[in-house]
Image (spheres, rainbow, N blue to C red):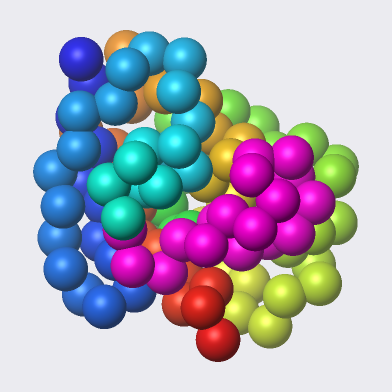
Amino acid sequence: MPRIFFHGSNGERNVLEVPIGHSLMEAAMDNSIAGIVAECGGACACATCHTYIAEAWFDQVPVMSEMEDSLLDAIQDRRANSRLACQIEMIAELDGLEVHAADNEN
């Protein structure tokens, strides 16, 4: 199973094994990652699973949809490497991915 390095909004670093086909949001929720709220349950409707993808990995995650881009435009802390964890499905090529949770709890 591919591993990801998920940093919670509290600064805690977690190494997660994520099954192929699961979203980063599912992995975060299954492991109680600080900062990932996922109010909509992965429907790309709330942006409470906002993350920052490590720049070295940003070009390797799937391209962002227009819906995800629109949701991210509505948040204050958007950065060039912002993504919604519900929209990134784990594939073997993402083994070693590093992700930082935004503070979605405030």
Task: State how many labels appear.
Answer: 0
Q: Residue 29: x and y, percent?
A: 40, 47
**Residue situated in front as seen by the camera: 76 or 103:** 103
> What residue is rendered at 29% in x and 26% in y?
18
Q: Residue 43: x and y, percent?
A: 74, 40
> What residue is rendered at 20% in x and 15% in y?
1
Q: Is residue 4 magenta?
A: no
60 left or right of 80 in image: left
**Residue situated in front as seen by the camera: 61 or 68:** 68
**Residue situated in front as seen by the camera: 52 or 6:** 6
Q: Residue 102: x and y, percent?
A: 46, 71
> What residue is rendered at 27% in x and 47% in y?
31
Q: Which residues are magenta?
A: 33-49
Answer above or below: position of 75 versus 2. Answer: below
Answer above or below: position of 30 versus 94. Answer: below
Magenta segment's dominant SS is: loop
**Residue 56 in view:** no
Answer above or below: position of 85 versus 96. Answer: below
Q: Quadrant of the C terminus?
A: bottom right
Q: Residue 63: x and y, percent?
A: 65, 32
Q: Is residue 38 magenta?
A: yes
**Residue 65 in view:** yes
Answer above or below: position of 51 versus 84. Answer: below
100 left or right of 49 in image: left
